Image (cartoon, helix red, strand yellow):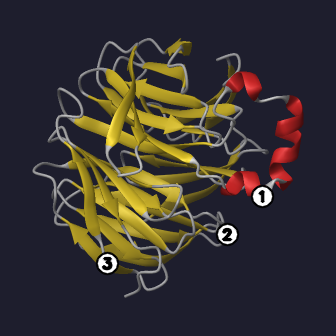
Amino acid sequence: MFSLLHKEENAHENALWACTWGRDTADPDPDDAGTEAEEENPFDFDKKEARPKDFIVTGGLDDLVKVWDLREDNTLKLRHQLKGHALGVVSVAVSSDGQTIASSSLDSSMCLWDARSGDKKHLLSFGPVDLWTVGFSPCNKYVISGLNDGKISMYSVETGKAEQTLDAQNGKYTLSIAYSPDGKYIASGAIDGIITIFDVAAGKVVQTLEGHAMPVRSLCFSPNSQMLLTGSDDGHMKLYDVTHSDVVGTLSGHASWVLCVSFSEDGKHFASSSSDRTVKVWDTSERKCLHTFAEHSDQVWGVRYSPGNDKVASASEDKSLNIYFCPPNAIV
């Protein structure tokens, strides 16, 4: 049964604008993680079966990034409160190995943090250029960000230096970005509703998708990189076939702007959040809504599926962070 597992009231002193999950995949003690263990890791299935530690990262209007450990009983324990931004935090991302956190702020800066220690690794400032969303490459070596002139920049996690810039040449404000899990593509959603797909290796635009009439606030690739899911202020979500750039489905159900979308790890479901104050869980193949959570009292800026397929977190203007149970085998 779909259910609310936990509500963290007043998770921030002000509105929550972003949330994401992280999973500690390395040895809990960095000093014990030798090279040998790292080499064995891909084949050590028993070790992978040991209970991984999931955590949630949130960003808010109070300029803070917070890291929350998920306890066995699904309550949250604050691990870190990260201070480094001068204005509200609009986007947070975690590398797939759970070691690095990226955050971007209205102050036009991006911070890279050590997830374990909470230390700031890099602070990148962009002057007057507005910076919105951030994301990691699948290999965890790069962080990508969208800028207000339609360009996508790629930075080295190790050095904090710019490595590559992708230019859509349309000059429109980039509101959302996503890196395909296979590492081939980066998609960006602009304020004019246009979606651009870049071939990373070639460094050029391969597709331009027109389907939304209003800003595309969120997009994400399916786990197999074959589909792109978008959410827009027009109240609709669209599923695109990445190879053929066809719209394979348009989903409606929210009464207002769709602010965030997120696929489950197995791709069977996805979640959406809206300024209509709800979180919805959808069946991907049937393109139908499975459940609606109405547990927030204000717009829901962020929603993310957990790495384990069975939980969803949502972050809202009402200052609360919610965790829901979403059965992985649920069908229409």
Q: Which residue is label 3 attached to? A: 289
Q: Distance of mark 3 from mark 2, alpha carbons?
A: 26 Å
Q: Is residue 118 left or right of residue 232?
A: right
**Do the residues bearing badges 1 and 3 touch, measured as CB atoms within 8 Å?**
no
Point out the image quarter for the C terminus.
bottom left
Q: Position of residue 114 (x, y in %)?
A: 57, 22
Residue occupying image coordinates x 30% and y 50%: 314
In what element is the residue under mark 3?
strand
Residue 325 visible in image: yes
Q: Position of residue 265 (x, y in %)?
A: 55, 63
**Do the residues bearing badges 3 and 2 touch, measured as CB atoms within 8 Å?**
no
Q: Which residue is label 2 attached to? A: 243
Front position among marks 1 and 3: 1
Instruction: From the viewer's side, name the closer residue of 126 and 157.
Output: 157
Residue occupying image coordinates x 54% and y 39%: 135
Q: Amino acid at mark 1?
A: Phe
In what element is the residue under mark 2?
loop
Instruction: From the viewer's side, name the closer residue of 45 and 140.
Output: 45
Q: Distance of mark 1 from mark 3, alpha carbons?
A: 35 Å
Q: Distance of mark 1 from mark 2, alpha carbons?
A: 33 Å
Crowding near the residue tagged with mark 3, few <14, some 14–19, many ≥20 C-alpha atoms within 10 Å: many
